Amino acid sequence: MDGSIQAGYGARPGTSPATLRGEGLVFDGFGWSKAGQPRNREARTQTPLELSYNARCVYVGNLPPLEILDNEALKQFFQRAMTERGWHDTSKEVSPSSPMVIGVYRDTSGKWAFLEFRTVAEATTCMGLTGIMYGTTAIVVNRTKGYTPVSDELFPQLKAAGIMGNTIVCPDGRSTTTSAASAQEMGIAVVPGVQQSNIPGGAPSIAGVPQRLMDMSRRVRKVFVGNLPREAAELTPEYLLAFFTEAMTAANLTDKDRAASMIIWACIVNPHKNFGFIEFRTVAEAESVF
């Protein structure tokens, strides 16, 4: 940053903040205006990128220290992971040469960050990378706390601007299903009784439940498990998944309205093996495990 104003409400591009303050302008967090004269914050129409910001950002946590994985390396790591899996957007509005990750906003601690994607579809697809390993560290990928699905009203505008992408679910929450053969080619695990999302690597959704509702409920379907025995060499995500599935089934705590036997959809174990996170199929099962 050179201290000049490149964009803003009521500001001249290239003008320094000191010059604007000298002219009696104040910055209120949204833009510059005359002191004592409230400015209409809606005077400037938000761009499609601004309107879709929350839907295009994802949270990534449990990151290695900055000296091991800096912001540029983090950006390239996810760019490469998405590209290798063929999870890049193929919309005609999206340039194949443009980067998928267009912004990295790292917390001062360096332990977590927000990644901004060029399309809503690619941000949604990235959710399938939760648990991806960087060295010996399992990186957590999740929706941001401020995430809100794109509304029906905004969908046409963002779609026309090429912001939605071509792998996102419909605005009413309907998810396009795919055949078992094509799903296997795309790397999607086909689970009997569970509707498959058309997002490669994305979490499955219960038949009849909109994918976006499953995304919104992920935080309440996920539970923390701690005090795990560090010395247990067999303590892998697969072992933890099998252990809790067997325990829940034996205790008769599974959802009787769901025919599928897979009650756990995601399981992450900390590299030090002293804690982990389990994502359950339903909110009821996540509450029952307590």
Image (tube, rainbow, N blue to C red):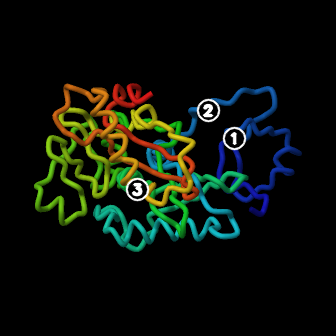
In the rendered structure, which disc, 2 or 3, sits on the residue that comes first in sequence? 2
Q: Which residue is mark 1?
A: 31
Q: Amino acid at mark 1?
A: Gly
Q: Residues within 10 Å of mark 2 (few under 14, many from 20)?
A: few
What count of labels does the image hold?
3
Say which of marks 3 and 1 sits in front: 3
- The span from disc 3 to disc 1 (Cα, nearest Å) is 33 Å
Residue 13 horizontal side relative to residue 80, left or right: right
The correct choice, above or below, for 258 with respect to 204 in the image is above
Side (left or right) of 84 relative to 145: left
Q: Quadrant of the C terminus?
A: top left
Q: Which one is in front, 84 or 12?
A: 84
Residue under the point 35% across and 43% down = 157
- Answer whether residue 227 is visible to the viewer in this image: yes
The amino acid marked with disc number 3 is Cys
Q: Position of residue 185 (x, y in %)?
A: 18, 66
Label pair 1/2, CB-CB below 8 angstroms: yes
Of the pair 243 and 289, the residue shown nearer to us: 243
The residue lying furthest to the right in this view is 22
Q: Amino acid at mark 2?
A: Arg
Which residue is labeled 3 in the image?
126
User: Residue 288 lies in what quarter of the image?
Assistant: top left
Q: Give the labeled residue for mark 2.
A: 41
Residue 46 vs 272, above or below: the answer is: above
Residue count near mark 1 (Cα–Cα under 10 Å), binned few <14, some 14–19, many ≥20? some
| Quarter of the rendering occupied by the N terminus | bottom right
Q: Residue at x 86, y 51 (%)?
A: 18
Q: CA distance from mark 1 to mark 2?
A: 8 Å
Asked if the residue at tag 1 contacts the one at tag 3, i.e. Cβ–Cβ closer than 8 Å, the answer is no
